[in-house]
Image: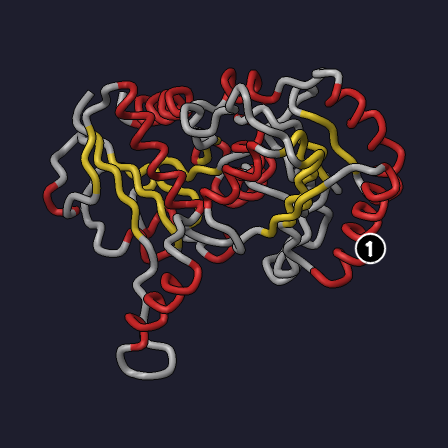
């Protein structure tokens, strides 16, 4: 195969309030919260790691004009700007977050020579199919670094449960109606727990608290893949996931999605990984079963991750997609 050109392109930051504050604001955020890698950045980094494991010949962010004929092009990033300046004839495999919804870019496949648009999972891919067609869409799950996210044999489990809060919509009401009863039930059962909230921790902190936790309750309306959840499973932490089953993004109506859109908070999951619940009543009915199966070693989520979502397996899926475009 010819050399593969990988691109990761983020939105150019502009001044918001004062001239030059595009440099000051990120610096202050980094000072206060520390350096963080975004989810889409991790997707790209892990693809590179997977290609390294497969000994694939690739480069990163070569100027578009230097691309040679028949050399594959993969563009990942955030926002419609990711392809700005691309005038080559080479077909592009693009994803994951170039747009929030396909209605926002109906001419995507005519504006650029796009061959495939990628989504991580079946339910998110289904949103794009009516707009772009089955032949133009592909599912590509990102890989998990299973060497890094691995359990320690002698880790001390200080917490029975880690409660992971990634509630996105109607946060106050959802925490009151869903999370509060869950915490109350854990207290009633005498289970110790720690809490962590998406966006408010560093990766090293998450890694450490996972090592200290026997199981995890995952609270998120829906996920295209669920990186944090997959990382927990890679560390063999069983997950009890809230999976209410519908896409709840408040923008969906404006995007023309007037019917119920099926969604999942755990698109990569089976019975080895843990259990799921739909609402507080379902949690109440199932928590004992989850806990007893957990303490009797009835789950093996790491096995699922090793079978389906390693760096090498994800990179091979990407290679298969590339080979379908560049035979």
Circle 1 SS class: helix
Decide: is 160 above or below 301. Answer: below
Report the residue marked by disc 1: 177
Looking at the picture, how far across and down is residue 129, in whole percent? 54, 39
Which quadrant: the C terminus? top left
Count of labels in the image: 1
Q: Residue furthest bottom?
A: 18
Q: Name the residue at 34% across, 32% down.
A: 47
Looking at the picture, how far across and down is residue 6, in whole percent? 25, 38
Instruction: Tell which of 91 and 313 is nearer to you.
Output: 313
Q: Name the residue at 70% across, 20% down.
A: 271
Q: In this rendering, would 150 be left or right of 171?
A: left
Q: Name the residue at 65% across, 35% down.
A: 158
Looking at the picture, how far across and down is residue 30, in whole percent? 37, 61
Which quadrant: the N terminus? top left
Decide: is 175 above or below 326. Answer: below
For residue 252, which quarter of the picture?
bottom right
Q: Name the residue at 36% across, 41% down.
A: 94
């Amino acid at each position: 195969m010819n050399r593969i050109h990988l691109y990761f392109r983020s939105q150019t930051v502009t001044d918001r309030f004062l001239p030059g504050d595009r440099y000051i604001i990120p610096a202050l955020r980094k000072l206060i919260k520390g350096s963080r890698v975004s989810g889409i950045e991790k997707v790209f980094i892990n693809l590179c790691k997977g290609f390294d494991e497969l000994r694939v010949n690739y480069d990163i962010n070569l100027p578009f004009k230097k691309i040679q004929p028949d050399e594959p092009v993969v563009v990942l990033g955030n926002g419609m700007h990711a392809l700005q300046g691309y005038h080559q004839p080479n077909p592009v495999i693009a994803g994951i977050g170039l747009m929030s919804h396909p209605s926002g870019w109906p001419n995507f496949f005519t504006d650029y020579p796009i061959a495939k648009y990628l989504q991580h999972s079946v339910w998110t891919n289904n949103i794009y199919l009516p707009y772009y067609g089955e032949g133009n869409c592909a599912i590509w799950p990102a890989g998990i670094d299973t060497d890094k996210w691995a359990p320690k044999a002698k880790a001390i489990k200080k917490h029975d449960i880690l409660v992971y809060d990634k509630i996105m919509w109607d946060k106050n009401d959802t925490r009151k109606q869903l999370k509060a009863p869950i915490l109350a039930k854990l207290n009633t059962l005498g289970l110790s727990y720690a809490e962590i909230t998406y966006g408010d921790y560093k990766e090293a902190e998450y890694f450490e608290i996972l090592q200290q936790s026997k199981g995890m309750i995952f609270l998120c309306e829906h996920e295209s893949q669920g990186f944090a959840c997959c990382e927990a499973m890679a560390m063999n932490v069983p997950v009890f996931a809230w999976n209410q089953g519908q896409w709840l993004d408040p923008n969906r109506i404006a995007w023309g999605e007037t019917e119920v859109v099926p969604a999942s908070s755990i698109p990569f999951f089976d019975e080895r990984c843990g259990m799921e619940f739909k609402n507080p009543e379902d949690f109440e009915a199932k928590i004992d079963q989850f806990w007893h199966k957990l303490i009797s070693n009835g789950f093996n989520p790491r096995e699922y991750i090793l079978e389906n979502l390693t760096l090498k397996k994800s990179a091979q899926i990407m290679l298969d997609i590339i080979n379908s475009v560049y035979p």
